[in-house]
Amino acid sequence: MLKVLHVAGGLEPELGGPTTAILNYVVCADGPAIESHLVSPIDDVDSPLARELRAKLGSHAEKLTLLERTGRFKGRASRWGISLSLARWLQRNASEFDVIVLHGAWMFSSVAGLFAARRAGKPCVLVPHESLTEYDVNRKGSAARIIAKRNLKRAYGKHCRLFVFTSRAEAAQSFPTGSSARQTVLPYPLYDDRGDSTPVPRTFVDPAFRIGFLGRLHPKKNVDMLLRAVALLPERFTLTIGGDGPADLKIKLESLAGELGIVRRVSWKGFISSDRKDNFFQSIDVLVMPSAFESFGIVAAEAMMRGVPAIVSPQTGAAEIIAEHGGGLAVESKETMLAEALLSLDRDRARMTELSKEAIAVSAKELSFSHIGARFGDQLTDVARVRT
């Protein structure tokens, strides 16, 4: 039995897609040959969030260890995974596991996990969740912070045995120069195929055309471009925006909708919790993700596995899956090209139904717990076999 420890800096909903992915990694690779365990800090081990996390893991809830943050490390510390109790726990328990999987590159939790693994003589695997990309390394921040990130990236390249990237695009931008580590491209496990239920393909007969966007509001998401594209479309095209972000950016986007004359056609839903996602996706016909870059694009995959076609930019990892298997379209992040693609789908509703069928099929084939779990398990087993 291979014992695998996953180390996360936080599992709060505001941390976005990686929270879902981390929980799913623990579940999908856990089985007769691999025993998975997850450790993460949290502000309150008896909070509703803690209960929700255990509920999401279901029968695997006993594989979760939550360690309470204290004092000034509560609240904002979730962004960085700062927890002295986590560091102490790792030093005491790392030797009990065969492989240590670190989630996120810039988290205190990953640095502490790397030190604990080296001290215990255990191999490390890094799942960076986009954090090693050149965009992330060089994005707005002090020169000292950028230098620190570059040094830490080299340290991971030297001491980690395997890097798990979610797309070829992420791998191309992320793998540390000169590293002798292995790397693999493995999409996030999102489609839970342990049950018998299968999503039903959508049919599109309503004259209205409902566009959806879901994600944190950030300049790289190109929501302003999406608003401009909607302004080029007939009145029957509406846009529902799920997600929150900095107040100044939201005000700017709402003002833009006013300038474009589409206020009545845009609905702002704010943050969409996991228990509201089904309703959100049920309320739209197409999910649009026009980001400047996404290592994968969990939201696009979440839409597709519910039978909602996804329109993504070619700079997203999901575009690689769509190009190979269908289930959506890859369209450049330009308002005219996006508007043209949406009009084309509006004119061919049968094509939309075909995309819906493809989306469900590709999710079941490429993003399922069983498929990703088997591949991930093979990688972990190989890592454990190599002796340093």
Image: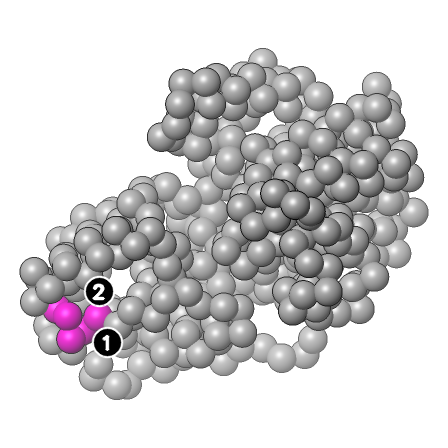
Residue ID at (8%, 62%) = 260
- Helix, strand or loop at disc 1? strand
User: Quick one: 332 or 293, which is closer to the camera?
Assistant: 293
Asked if the residue at tag 2 contacts the one at tag 1, i.e. Cβ–Cβ closer than 8 Å, the answer is: yes
Query: Is residue 264 magenta-colored?
Result: yes
Q: Which residue is mark 1?
A: 209
Q: Which image quarter: residue 233?
A: bottom left
Query: What amino acid type should be assigned to the residue bearing mark 1?
Result: Phe
Q: How many marks?
A: 2
**Residue neighbourhood size for the residue with mark 1, other residues' Cα within 10 Å, grouped as few (<14), some (14–19), many (≥20):** many
Find the magenta span and give its range.
262-266
- Name above or below for residue 152 compared with residue 220: above
Q: Is residue 173 among what the camera can see?
A: no
Magenta span contains residue 304: no
> Which of the two residues, 22 or 310, is positioned nearer the viewer here?
22
Residue 342: mark: 2
Pinpoint residue 293: horizontal percent, then vertical percent. Answer: 37, 41
Of 179 and 96, which appears nearest the observer? 96
